[in-house]
Amino acid sequence: MSFMEVTAFLFDGFLISLLIFAVTLICGVPLGLPIAFCSMSRFKPVKAISKIVVWIVRGVPLMLQIFIIYYVPGLLFNFPMFSKVDRFFFTNYGIADAGRILAVLIAFSINYACYFSEIYRGGIESISKGQYEAGQVLGMTKRQIFRHIILKQVIQRIVPPMSNEIITLIKDTALANCIVVCEIIKQAKELAATKALVWPLFYTGVFYLVFVGLLTIVLGRVEKKLSYFRS
């Protein structure tokens, strides 16, 4: 295979990596906020359950979580739903790996939502109580205080750790190949197995480096704009 053919073949896999990346952000970023509020709840049962869930998700390797979500329904309930989704989409629409990708998206979204929730919680709790009290003196409701005073400062404070998680996310998409999702690493391994080409496996690093470079530039600009809210 020529260099351009290998590049095109790997890029097909990288599109799957980008899909996992995008959907995880779309689902995980907003989902992390209610989890953070539950972790800060004054209602102890809700707080305890939330903290236990976050502890488990953050403590168990993401690869194992993918295995659990993909295989456990079939093992425990004799209902391999993701395999059925695979067959349905392949039979009716010619789309391969739909069920596997869905399992990966669920695992990634839950995992990163829990990580984001801790970042949110840390950002919210870092704001001094005096600012809440100042808002109350001005006659503002708790919702208005959070929206107009607290939220902008929280966003500014969480951008750096969020940036790190987002950059880590694109690299973690490689874990999807553990259940044979055809992301870029799986594509490179396929070339090694069928064409005896090893160099494409190392070449995949270029795709990650370029994308991480673009992310770094974009997130750096976002952080710079939000420096206006630096206390």
Image (tube, helix red, strand yellow):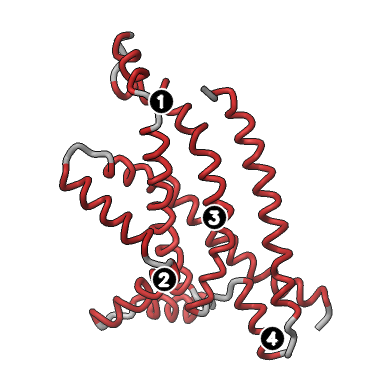
Q: What residue type is labelled 1?
A: Ile
Mark pair 2, 1: CA separation: 36 Å
The mark nearer the N terminus, 4 or 3, is: 3
The mark nearer the N terminus, 1 or 4, is: 1
**200 horizontally vs 227: left or right:** right
Please tell me in which quadrant of the rendered image residue 75 appears.
Answer: bottom left
Residue 180 in the image: state x and y as whole percent: 52, 79
Q: Which mark is residue 192?
A: 4
The residue pinned by badge 3 equals 22
Please tell me in which quadrant of the rendered image residue 211 appears.
Answer: bottom right
Q: Badge 3 local density, few (<14 within 10 Å), some, or many (20+)?
A: some
Mark pair 3, 1: CA separation: 27 Å
Q: What residue type is labelled 4?
A: Ala
Q: Which mark is residue 66?
A: 2
Q: Do the residues labelled 4 and 3 touch (CB within 8 Å)?
A: no
Q: Give the secondary structure at mark 1.
A: helix
Q: Which residue is drawn at 52% across and 51% down?
A: 165
